[in-house]
């Protein structure tokens, strides 16, 4: 277990570093989300999911849906780490004819299951996929990765109700509770607490953990995958925007980040130093 934890911590570090390097290409991006969601993605692709990087459409794969398409920079980083995309491609991020557009698009990127970004659509699609897999007797899981801003959407709650009705135990919803969206704190734009109670009332198995505590994230994935009941599963991850780079963590508004050119290398240096110190602790 210690070796797995170390390997996943290293993977999360590289996901953050790849995301910062892509941000530097454009000078801007959804970096706060990428840094905050990196631990969840590292566990997903470093431990939980079944996939074949050299065969992204393999029928036996677990489906990972990026409902919050603006998190694409984070997702590309983990796809690079997992071997779907060559590291050299990160230099094309957001450029014309790149396979890495700024918002996730399924037709462009290997491993991207849906074109997300019109928020509230991922979970309804995930319900349909989970139903189809069950009818086909395919044991794969469907993961829906989404933002707390999507809790404002009625389609999310319709899908939540449908998933419970159909007893979709092959569906795992991952929600980033970073309390930030374009118009301000998510909880002030549209109050969503008590969130765990709401999902429980809708008939889901619910866990809530610190999304930047890697052992807690790992344990939550394992519980969700190994449950023996017939409920869909949701994991609520409380995360910190900009995690790992203090001067980005402290920004009051970090939904979409622009920084001065020298600050990208400063952020990478801070990340590298923290990883070095952690490895030698």
Image (cartoon, helix red, strand yellow):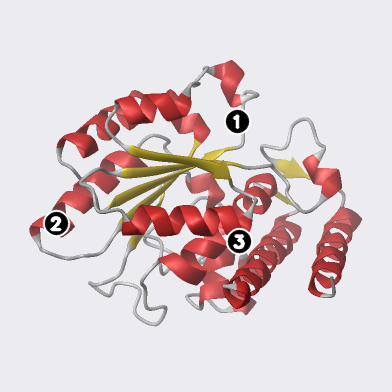
Mark 3 and mark 1 lie on one chain; the one further toward the N terminus is: 3
With 122 as the anchor, is 117 left or right in this view?
right
- What's the CA distance linking mark 2 and mark 1? 34 Å
Instruction: Identify the residue at horizontal 35%, vertical 73% (top origin).
Output: 56
Classify 217 as above or below 50.
Answer: above
Label 1 crowd bin: few (<14), some (14–19), many (20+), radius 10 Å: some
Instruction: Identify the residue at horizontal 60%, vertical 61% (top origin).
Output: 95
| Viewport quadrant of the N terminus | bottom right
With 187 as the anchor, is 117 left or right in this view?
left
- What's the CA distance linking mark 3 and mark 1? 25 Å
| Viewport quadrant of the C terminus | bottom right
- What's the CA distance linking mark 2 and mark 3? 39 Å
The reply to whether discs 2 and 3 touch (Cβ–Cβ < 8 Å) is: no
Mark 2 and mark 3 lie on one chain; the one further toward the N terminus is: 3
Write down the residue under mark 1: 181
With 38 as the anchor, is 198 left or right in this view?
left
Classify 235 as above or below 191.
Answer: below
Q: Depth-wise, is mark 2 or mark 3 nearer the camera?
A: 2
Q: Which mark is residue 134?
A: 2
Q: Position of residue 155 (x, y in %)?
A: 31, 29
With 240 as the anchor, is 215 left or right in this view?
left
Badge 3 marks a residue whose secondary structure is loop
Mark 2 and mark 1 lie on one chain; the one further toward the N terminus is: 2
The reply to whether discs 3 and 1 touch (Cβ–Cβ < 8 Å) is: no
Please say whether residue 109 is visible from this viewpoint: no
Q: Residue furthest bottom?
A: 54
Q: Position of residue 26 (x, y in %)?
A: 71, 56
Q: Nearer the viewer, residue 144 or 92?
A: 144
Q: Which mark is residue 95?
A: 3
Q: Quadrant of residue 269?
A: bottom right
């Amino acid at each position: 277990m210690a070796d797995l934890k170390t390997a996943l911590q290293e993977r999360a570090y590289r996901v953050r570093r790849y995301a910062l390097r892509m941000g530097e290409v454009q000078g801007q991006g959804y970096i706060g989300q990428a840094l905050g969601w990196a631990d969840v993605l590292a566990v997903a692709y470093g431990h939980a999911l079944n996939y074949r990087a050299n065969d992204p459409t393999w029928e036996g794969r677990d489906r990972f849906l990026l409902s919050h398409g603006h998190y694409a920079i984070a997702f590309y980083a983990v796809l690079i780490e997992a071997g779907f995309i060559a590291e050299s491609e990160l230099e094309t991020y957001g450029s014309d004819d790149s396979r890495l557009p700024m918002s996730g698009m399924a037709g462009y990127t290997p491993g991207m299951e849906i074109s997300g970004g019109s928020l509230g659509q991922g979970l309804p699609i995930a319900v349909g996929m989970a139903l189809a897999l069950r009818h086909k007797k395919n044991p794969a899981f469907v993961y829906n990765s989404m933002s707390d801003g999507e809790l404002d959407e009625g389609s999310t709650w319709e899908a939540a109700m449908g998933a419970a009705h159909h007893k979709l135990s092959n569906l795992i919803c991952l929600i980033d509770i970073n309390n930030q969206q374009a118009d301000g704190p998510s909880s002030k734009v549209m109050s969503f607490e008590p969130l765990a109670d709401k999902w429980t009332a809708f008939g889901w198995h619910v866990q809530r953990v610190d999304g930047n505590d890697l052992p807690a994230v790992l344990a939550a994935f394992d519980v969700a995958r190994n449950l023996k009941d017939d409920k869909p599963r949701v994991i609520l991850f409380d995360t910190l925007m900009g995690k790992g780079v203090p001067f980005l963590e402290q920004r009051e508004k970090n939904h979409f980040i622009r920084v001065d050119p020298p600050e990208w290398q400063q952020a990478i240096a801070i990340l590298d130093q923290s990883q070095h110190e952690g490895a030698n602790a």
